[in-house]
Amino acid sequence: MLIKRRKASDVAPSEITPHSVYLRRREFLQTAAMAGAAAALSPLAPWTIGEAQARGMKLANIKPSPYTLESLGEGAKLTDYADVTSYNNFYEFGTSKSDPAREAGSLKTKPWTVVVDGHVENPGRYDLDDLIKPHALEDRVYRFRCVEAWSMVVPWVGIPLADIIKRLGPTGDAKYVSFETLVDPEQMPGQGFAVLDWPYREGLRMDEAMNPLTLMTVGLYGEVLPNQNGAPIRLVVPWKYGFKSIKSIVRISFTDTQPKTSWNMAAAREYGFYSNVNPEVDHPRWSQAKERRLGGARNVFGFVAKEPTLMFNGYQEEVASLYQGMDLKRYF
Amino acid sequence: MNAVTAAMPMPRNPLAYAKPVIWLLALSPLAWLALTAQQQGLGPNPAEYLNRFLGDWALRMLFVALAITPVRKLTGWTDVARFRRLIGLFAFFYVALHVTSYVVLDQFLDWAAIWADVVKRTYITLGMVAFVILAAMAATSTTGMMKRMGGRNWRRLHKGVYAAGILACVHFFMMRKGLQLEPMIYGAILAMLLGARLLPNRKRAHSTRT
């Protein structure tokens, strides 16, 4: 009969497995099984990956902000983490909504450098940490309205862009800020086809960039941004259509002329430089009067009903003054 | 001949099995859809998923219907034409479901908004024209209607399928943002299917009738 005697030098199982995981081992196994099943089914149902996937690292020392869920009014509800992270337009990883969640694993977000140039006192190549660390992260729940007439409510984590800009010190010639996304078809397989003229470019007028709502974002749901949501650093401009909120930023330039922006370059008739959420100005191909809030209230058929889109996505009080006297039909 | 085939009663015409097989194949996307819906749901935006899924299959089924003439020409297999009506009706079936999902799930029977879309949005206008053409073809697809209309008029109307195919592809191309590969592939397939009609007829090779 073989009796295994434990030697003092043997490693106890509890030493290998972190205690917290050990205590939740059943849950862990379930999650692992779910992940396996999700992987097997992934060509069918990529959105199931979101839930089972390992979630991002918790971000520490996040301070609260006035932009809470409650501030969005009664009945506001956060969009599920799984939906926020599995239904993405990020054409660098493919044109289907489910492509980014499936393909973005190839993006290397560490180390990450952001080039700062143009009319600015402190140009240079900044390591992401050097750009972010001097500031306190904030939790901010914003409405997110895609130009395709669907919307979400997302708890972002970030820093007001204004704080970063102040530190970089734009000169008097800086009238606009422009941004570029990484170009690397090895990491971003969707760039193998010229859906857009890569790199993806976006821009803001300086006063828009300095508006307190404009957020340089590094996380969501209190965690590090998943790659498919624009890791490691993206913009969030909540009163503009989602495509203005450029992802995976590698360059910030201060310019004296209005920068070129990707969707405007692709179809100037359909996507203006401003692209403010405006229910009265339709996209040439569809109405912008209503939106479908993902995970929102359902109609009798069991599908989410459309609801009216708000002027400036509901941020009229904060931003309407930026566009005083401008014809918003012309400057769409 | 081995034992298994010997034991099977041979039908007088092997094509007798073809129609049930076509039914099964043509309905299998819906079975797959139901299974997906039941197993893991249709994703964060089910209304959009459903509409796109039905649109994709409407276009694919229309291509299958349009492939019949090229198959006949290239292989000389004339019997294949007997399935054209059935497959064409299945194409219309998916088109009708696609339009229904737009009217009911997307617009929630908001007829004013639907009318505004039809007159204002070119890609919806084109899609609706294709729908009307295919609806007219489906309505006149019976032998009785063919007789009532007269062969020439009937054929003229049913040539509308070419227009419908082109409109459907343009509709697909226009609803995508940016320069996308998928609608281009569909466009190329349609071009081949239409181009193949210019080929000369091949002599009857495998016809069961003489």
Image (cartoon, helix red, strand yellow):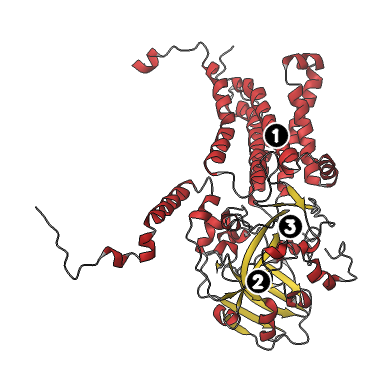
Q: Give the quarter of the image for residue B94.
A: top right
Image quadrant occupied by the C terminus of chain A: bottom right
Residue type (three-letter) at the residue carrying disc 1:
Val
Alpha carbon of mark 2 to alpha carbon of mark 3: how far? 20 Å
Q: Are marks 3 and 1 in contact (CB under 8 Å)?
A: no
Which residue position holds label 1?
B95
Give the secondary structure at mark 2. Answer: strand
Which residue position holds label 2?
A180
| Left or right side of A190 for A240 | right
Give the secondary structure at mark 3. Answer: loop
Comparing labels 2 and 3, the label whose residue is closer to the camera: 3
Q: Where is residue B150 shown, x and y percent of the image?
A: 80, 16
Work out whether residue A79 or residue B14 is closer to the camera in this orientation and state it: A79
Q: Are marks 2 and 1 in contact (CB under 8 Å)?
A: no
Q: Residues within 10 Å of mark 2 (few under 14, many from 20)?
A: many
Q: Residues within 10 Å of mark 1 (few under 14, many from 20)?
A: many
Residue found at x 55% / y 16%: B16
Residue found at x 59% / y 30%: B27
Q: Give the quarter of the image for residue A145.
A: bottom right
State the residue lying farthest toward the left: A1
Q: Chain of mark 1?
A: B
Q: Chain of mark 3?
A: A
Q: Give the quarter of the image for residue A191.
A: bottom right
Residue type (three-letter) at the residue carrying disc 3:
Val
Q: Where is residue B142 shown, x and y percent of the image?
A: 72, 18
Image: A131 above or below B131? below
Which residue position holds label 3?
A147
Work out whether residue A202 or residue A4 is closer to the camera in this orientation and state it: A4
